[in-house]
Image (cartoon, rainbow, N blue to C red):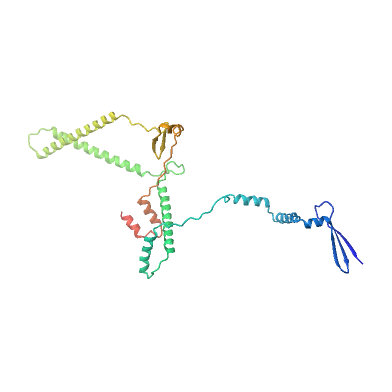
Amino acid sequence: MPVVITQTIRPQGTVGKAPTIQASKSPGGFGVQVSANQKNKLNDPGGGSFRDDDDINDVASMAGVNLNEESARIMATNSDLVGTQMQSCKDEPFLAAIPLHKRILETAKKLGITDVPAEVVTFISHATQSRLRTVIEKVTVITQHRMESYKDDEWYEQATDVRSQLKFFEQLERLEKQRKDEQEREILLKAAKSRSRQEDPEQARLKQKAKEMQQQELAQMRQRDANLTALAAIGPRKKRKLDAPGLLTIGGEGVGLCGGSQAGLGTGSPRQYPRQKITRVNLRDFIFYMEQEREMSRSLLLYRALLK
C-alpha cells in the first residue's frame, strides 16, 4: 500500500508558497516529486548563489568582519601598485672589478688560495660602498653638530664665552704694546732734540732710530691718504639689484634676458633659487669620529691623522 508523506519547509524570513515534496513508497523503489518552482531553482545555474552569499555573510557577521570595509581597505592599499611597472636594474659594482680582482688574488695567493670567484669581488665592492656610506653619514652628523649654534635657543644659557675672553686679552696686549711704543717714541724724540757736544755712540744710535721712525710714520700717513683718495674717486659700492625686471638669479649669479625672451620669462616675477647648503668636513671631525669608533679608536690611521 503506497504511503504519501507531505512536508512543508518554511525557512525564516521567507514569504510565499513553500515547496512541497511528495514521496511515495512502493515495492519498486522510492520516488520523490518536486514542485515546479523547486525544479526551476535547481535548473537555474545561478539559483544557489544567493544562499551561498547569505551563508558567507552570516559567517562573517559572526566573526565580526565587514566584507565591504575589508574590500575597500584592500583596494585602497593596492591602489599605489595599480599601473606601476616593475623593472629590474643591472647591479653595477661600486669599485672597478678588474683591479679589485687582481688585488684580491695577490692577497689570496699569500694565504694559499688560487681561485677567487666573481661573487667575492661583488660582495667586497658592496661592502666597501656600505662602509663608506656609513662613515660619511656619521661624519656629516658630527659636522652638523659642530656647526649648530645655540645662541638663539631659549633652552640654553651661555655660561662662558672663551672667544670674548681671548679678545679681551688681545686688546690688553695691544694696549701694552702701544704704551711701550709711545714711551720709546718719547725717548727717541728727546734724544733727537738734544744737542750735546760730546759724541756719544749711544746717543747717535738713538738719533738715527728716531729719524727712521719719523720716516716710517710719514710713509704710513702718505699711504693712508692715497687709499682715502682712491676710495673717494671710486665712489660708494653699489649693491646688486636682484629684483630688477628681466633678471633671473641662477646659482647666486644674475643672468639678464633681453630681446624676445623678455616677453616670456622676464615679464614675470624673478625666481630666486636658494643655494644648497654645503657641509664641510675637516680633519678634526674625522679624528673625533675615529676616536668614538671601537674598531678605529686604536688604529694606525688615527695616529697618522693626529700627527698631521
Q: On the rendered structure, is 285 left or right of 90? A: left
Give the vertical position of 249 relative to 279 (above or below). above
Whether residue 66 is visible here, answered yes or no, is no
Q: On the rendered structure, is 305 left or right of 262? A: left
- Give 250 or 224, whichever is nearer the viewer: 250
Relative image position of residue 30 (x, y in whole percent): 85, 66
Residue 165, quarter of picture: top left
Relative image position of residue 218 (x, y in whole percent): 19, 32
Whether residue 33 is visible here, answered yes or no, is yes
Q: Which residue lies furthest to the right in this view?
A: 1
Residue 210, quarter of picture: top left
Count how many numbered circles sit on residues in the image: 0
Give the residue at x 20% y 34%.
Answer: 219
Give the vertical position of 254 relative to 31 (above or below). above
- Give 210 or 227, whichever is nearer the viewer: 227
Relative image position of residue 73 (x, y in whole percent): 63, 50
Quadrant where the N terminus is found in the figure:
bottom right
Relative image position of residue 23 (x, y in whole percent): 86, 63
Quadrant where the C terminus is found in the figure:
bottom left
Residue 105, quarter of picture: bottom left
Give the residue at x 38% y 56%.
Answer: 290
Q: On the rendered structure, is 187 left or right of 262? A: left
Q: Which residue lies furthest to the left in this view?
A: 198
